[in-house]
Image: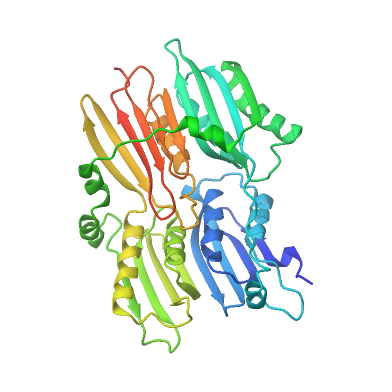
Amino acid sequence: MGIPSDDVVQIRHADAAGEPTVVTVSCPDKTGLGCDLCRVVLLFGLSVVKGDMSTDGRWCYIVLWVLPRGGRPVAVPWDLLKDRLLQLCPVTPPFGFDNAYLAAAGLQDVAPPAPQLFLLKLCCLDRMGLLHDVTRVLCELELTIRRVKVSTTPDGSVLDLFFITDARELLHTKNRREETQDKLESVLGDSLTCCEIDPAGEDMLSCLQSWASLTPAIMEQMFNTNLIEEQSISTRGGTISVTMDNSLSTVHTLIQIQCGDHKGLLYDIMRTVKDCNIQISYGRFYASQNGRCEIDLFAVQSDGKKILDQHRQRALCYRLRMEVHRPLRVALVNRGPDTELLVANPVEVSGKGRPLVFYDITLALKNLQKRIFLVWLRLGGTLWKIGSGKSTDYTLVRSMSSRLPCGAGLWMQSPTC
């Protein structure tokens, strides 16, 4: 018999404006749970200002103090956040069994079936920030973009093809489709001439393939580890320090990180630890008001032993410094009259990319007054091409397979061209 869901995830709201909301999770433990929880928090537009987590290998207890990103008061769907966090928590095993026994018997963590794929087709008139406005609506509705093709005709008409999946798994219903169409119509207004949602097969994705050629010079600029290592020594947010100590605990290795804060920092750390197959027994995270963060992690290897191998220690410290310093890789490349902006971000071993990257890119383009006229997006070996208005602006976003970075590129000229 499991424990009530209200006891698994609890959300205590702040007593005064500007104070953090406290999110508490108490459930059976599983590898990578902290990373998965931080990913959802990031998806809901929240920043973690303080965190504590502990586990005995069977049961874990996690407390996160969160604020809306940027300190701006926003309407956070707390009930929906609670549901999404609850879905990540393992079910309490029946009396007389434990998670280790169920996992050995193959009765735990069964992978859910792949979500059904749908094709969203939009026909409308072009305007500034169109793609970001559509992307924002899809994010708010928990619709995941798998692939995109956007094309604009000389007369300013736009055809958008979005291959999407629904986190709520309700897009096959009439009510869910009508909800999506109504929200898109409310944002696009009279410029929207057609909005259709139909089931799509995986075979349809093959017709939207496009690939970008990244020259060795571009790859060197974006992924030169020696250069990134030198830059991480002193950054705008202050120095980055990642150390390990085996003298303070007889059973754990202490990993200490001191660095500047950035959007999704705790997620980047937890993702790296998860991908390196490191298990955290106790962790503490604190972000000060001066923009500095301190993280203490008492960790063990997957075999339950301390991290004693010097090579493994250096490799893990190096990887953490890279992800803390530059979770996104950015490069500017001249292509004749155009300037190409390339953005790459890492992918989890599970194949999931960093949340909201496409959303943030389209928002940045909108703020920079860049009109988008052509887009290719593909997830899992994928490509986004984005361009603007009558100029030759493009953005190219390529999401590669597991353990390889997702990438984005933007060709720009002034909007007056």
- Number of numbered discs present? 0
Farthest-out residue, front:
203
Q: On the image, which quarter does residue 290 sit in?
A: bottom left
Instruction: Say which quadrant the N terminus sits in.
Output: bottom right
- At horizontal 56% and vertical 65% (from top left) the residue drawn is 33
Q: Quadrant of residue 365?
A: top left
Q: Measuring from the top left, give residue 53's x and y in whole percent.
A: 54, 72
Residue 172 in the image: above or below residue 168: above
Between 416 and 146, the one lying in front of the other is: 146
Q: What residue is shown at x 33% (from left), y 26% (from top)?
A: 393
Comparing 100 with 38, the one in front is 100
Q: Is residue 410 left or right of residue 269?
A: left
Would residue 18 be found to the left or right of residue 94 on screen? left
Q: Residue 211 placed where, x, y %? A: 37, 35
Q: Quadrant of residue 87?
A: bottom right
**Picture coordinates of residue 373 (x, y %)?**
42, 22
Q: Is residue 340 left or right of residue 354?
A: left
Task: Note whether 392 is above or below 363 in the view shown.
Answer: above
Q: Which residue is most to the top?
A: 155
Indicate the position of residue 41 as horizontal and vertical percent values: 55, 54
Which residue is at a point 51% across and 20% down the rendered structure image? 159
- Horizontal side of 388 relative to 13 (left or right) equals left
The residue sitting at the bottom extreme is 250
Q: Quick check: 89 above or below 68?
A: below
Residue furthest right in the image: 1
Location of the C terminus (image quadrant): top left
Q: Nearer the viewer, residue 351 or 9?
A: 351
